[in-house]
Amino acid sequence: MRILLLTTGLRLGGAERQVADLARQFVAFGHEVAVISLTLAQEVVLPAEVMLHRVDLHKDPLRFLFTLHSVRKWVGHWQPDIVHAHMFHANIFARLLRPRRAGGARIPVLCTAHSSREGGKLRMLAYRLTDGLCAATTHVSAEGMQYMLDVGATKTGRISVMPNGIDTDQFRRVPQAGVQARQALGIGPDARVVLNVGRLVHEKDQRRLIEAFRQLADDPETGAGICLLIAGDGPLKATLIQHAAALGLSHAVRLLGPCDNVPALMNAADLFVLSSMREGLPLVVAEALACETPLVATDVSGIRALLAASGSIVPAGDTDALARGMRAALLGRQDVAAGRVHAVAAYSLASVAQRWIDLYRELVQRRGAALPHASGKADHA
């Protein structure tokens, strides 16, 4: 197949990483892949085989229409079998794109929502008004899908759940990788390491995580040599550094910035913590499960399905509950082996990518079209 992935952007976020991961897996399956990004910034790496087209989308009506026209022309030249959009702006843009084949037939448009709440009333109205312009919509979690149904953004039968996937060959237990990561960071083998990975934004609530971590640092049972590593970047970096300093934790809280060694950090950690107030389907939790890292997560969208076999769930927005959950996880035991089995079975990238291919073929065939760009290679289960 010839697959076009259309994304709002390519910064270091969970949805953006999923686009890159799917592109890589589709290429490995033998399909042709192109990515269109509606913003110019790029922080995630795409395979060399993927054709990338970036545009600078603006809200100004005239510039928006000009961009829409230029992208429609580009898509008409490349002639994909399917257009698969990711995130709100790309979803609406793809619906308005109305791409056509050379013979005039419509190219199916599939839209994926990644956040538990894609926005307020205006965004939900935009979804509802353009719902008929796409072949189908998916959401990464059951909770997110139900929200879109509840607010009338789409209708039953027009939306389904499709989880994100992770590379479970890359994310696995490798003790030596953890030892090396600790050595590189100057952390001794006896230290307790708590890890958080994510954008430094209000939704991830790392401020509350730092406050909960202070309770562990002050606890004689958990405080000796404990440290908190936060991997990621974002607008709140300076604020979080200042907050840690104000709590007397500058020696124990380290903001690592963007990291390309997350599997090694997972192996180095004694505990992974998701402190978010809102999520779609937090893939980083599945990655922790696949690395057999004990974890605590706030009760946000997608978490109960993710932690069906291992891990601990605490209420979102409750500092004391988060601290208690972290303490119990550090001092107790979790069935991390069962957690990996669940992650591999439900969220492996290869199996999720194949489910997408099956859905693409269904949508194309529903249009009554052949697949002129179908790969000669067999699909992978």
Image (tube, grey):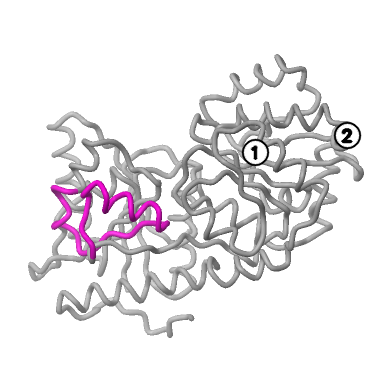
Amino acid type of disc 1?
A: Ala
Q: Which residue is mark 1?
A: 231
Q: Which residues are magenta?
A: 128-156
Number of numbered callouts drawn: 2
Say whether residue 269 is visible.
no
Q: Secondary structure at mark 1?
A: strand
Residue 49: horizontal and vertical position, in percent?
45, 63
Marks 1 and 2 in Cβ contact (< 8 Å): no
Say whether residue 87 is visible.
yes
* Image quarter of residue 324: top right
Quadrant of the image containing the N terminus:
bottom left
Residue at image location 53% in from the left, 56% down from the top: 304
The residue nearer to you, when weighing 142 against 132, is: 142
Residue 39: horizontal and vertical position, in percent?
34, 39
Mark identifier at residue 225:
2
Residue at image location 52% in from the left, 60% down from the top: 305
